[in-house]
Amino acid sequence: MKATDTGESIAETVSGLIRQAVGDVADDTDLRMIEGVDSVKVLRVIAAVERTYDIELEDEEVFALKTIDDVVRSVRAAVEAQGL
Amino acid sequence: MSDNGRTLHGELDRTARSQPGQLVSFVNERVELRLDELCAQSRSMALVMAESGVRRGDRVGLMLANEPAFLISLVALSRLGACACPLSLPTSGRDGYAEKVQGILAAAGVRQVVVSRKLARLKSLLAQALAGVSQLPADELAHGEAGEFPEVSGDDDLIVQFTSGSTSRPKGVRLRQTNLLAGLDAIRLGVDLGRPGDRAGVWLPLFHDMGLVGMLAAVVTGIPVSIWSPSSFVKDPARWLREVSDGGHTACAMPNFAYDLLRQAVPADDVPGYDLSRWRVAFNGAEPIAADSVAAFLAHFEPAGFRPEAMLPVYGLAEATLAVAFPPLGREPKVDWVDRVTLAESALAVPRDSASSGARPVVALGGPVAGIEFRIADPKNDGVLGERRVGEVQVQGAPVTPGYVGTQEQPLTVDGWLRTGDLGYLADGELHVTGRIKEMMIVRGVNYYPEDIEALIRADAEVYRRRCVAFIEGSEAAERIVLVAETTVDDDDERSRLRERLRAKVIAETGLEQLAVTLVGPNSIPRTSSGKLKRLESNRLVV
């Protein structure tokens, strides 16, 4: 749906969705180390991101995602791959 | 054919001959595997495995997701008379994964592990987890051409199932070919699997016993099976339910907490948009069954046509190749209300009115499945106990394991009954499970169930997501029960008020004064991979 989004707005949208769920954290904070955030919560946020961009990230890729920066990078790659 | 000649691949070959086009669908992978393809691919994989040195009697690790390679590898190993050792997959970065896997590989004497292509990006973690063993990449095992297969006996081990080990280190349960096939028969007969229109759905991890044995029961019966990744359920339970509804699935299994997730994921207004009327077997097992969860699920999904008699609270364990007790088909869940104090202090299940404050609900789990016998015995001397007397659940029969791998303590009594470690009683011929022996707490000669203490305070508005655990601590002279509860309350004064309130509530109901309350932040209480709170490991939270 937003395959034409610029890299900038992917970063904004993704970090917005994540901060909405886990609170105001830095782009390089390890999300699973935040008190109150468990792997179910991380999965649910990733699901919201996937729905927004109509993409599907592999579980094993999601496992390796630790920070907002990581998620943004993966989403960019997936959106680009979809645009091809 | 004698039972000793029965093998997993033999049964599957037979099913595939009568229904070659029956499908196993891997939903997230978008792969549909025909049974004849499964048989052919498992033959070629077995040949490549043999070339890689896999021999009859070898134990081979499976580090595979819910993907076709899991099923194909298992059948391939069966053809070789070798034994599969399913390994859990990494789920988060901080759970000591590599050490856990190393421990399992050493315990089982595994030298080779089939590894999913999907794990390629986790090279460094795999290098640690699989240090010292050789990796067989699943996608390179597909091209065997021709060769001989050994004669495989029903007595050969087929699976070593490592249990999630809520209360202890993982144990490797040996399951022979004959154990597995008897276990599959028990499930098929217990719910009459294979009725016209039957379709199974599995999202539990295949490395978990309930996922694996449940899936195999459906595949060997020759009904269509849909397999999802566990994360697709957890990420979006409502979407999963939509696919179950649209696909007309009739049989799915999951633990109690997953029924809670489904109820929370689908708003009441959306429920009538689902059609759950064809779902005829909803197994609820693998963790204690909460009567209130069951009732809430039934009420919530009634407008979707979910039938109360489809909810099947069951009991089983990996050591019995899964199924032990099933309620009769077509009966709504039944709850036995008993006196909480007598249950704990006198090990007697005395019926009480459900409305009285001292009553505890215990969900009825039915009678023994085909091939299984169970008894309630005094855990101290294994003497058999009568109706409504609480003791250890002990199990015997063809699906029951010959024992654990290695030299550790074996789970059998001298007269050959499996010790389950679970406490329970019989009433009207049905099994009722009340707790774990190891978690039972005795203070000054009085018994307490952790479940009872937790139930008293779980619903407090300031306890985060009902999460709390009780366990015993200290030496014999100074024993006390510690209650750990998660909360988001930050303020010191409010925290001490909350501690006092929880303590007062427990004392008022039980008279237990040797009680310490500890508050911790959300998600601090350790949980198993399936989300169960680990009582006995929570003592590290207490300073």
Image (cartoon, coloured by chain):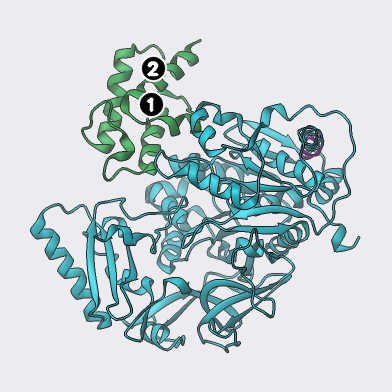
Which label number is shown at residue A2? Answer: 2
User: Can marks 2 and 1 be said to lie on one chain?
Assistant: yes
Question: Disc 1 marks which amino acid?
Answer: Thr
Q: Left of B444 or right of it: where is B513?
A: left
The colour applied to the residues of chain A in this rendering is: green
Q: What element carries label 2?
A: loop
Please name whichever residue, B55 or B447, is drawn nearer the observer in this view of the structure. B55
Reply yes or no: does residue B37 show up in magenta.
Answer: yes
Q: Left of B86 or right of it: where is B502?
A: left
Which chain is assigned cyan?
B
Q: Is residue B355 visible?
A: no
Q: Residue at left 49%, top 45%?
A: B99
Report the magenta residues as a range: B35-40
In the figure, B291 relative to B212: above or below?
below
Label 2 is found on which chain of the structure? A
Q: Residue at left 49%, top 16%?
A: A82
Pointer 1: what residue?
Answer: A52
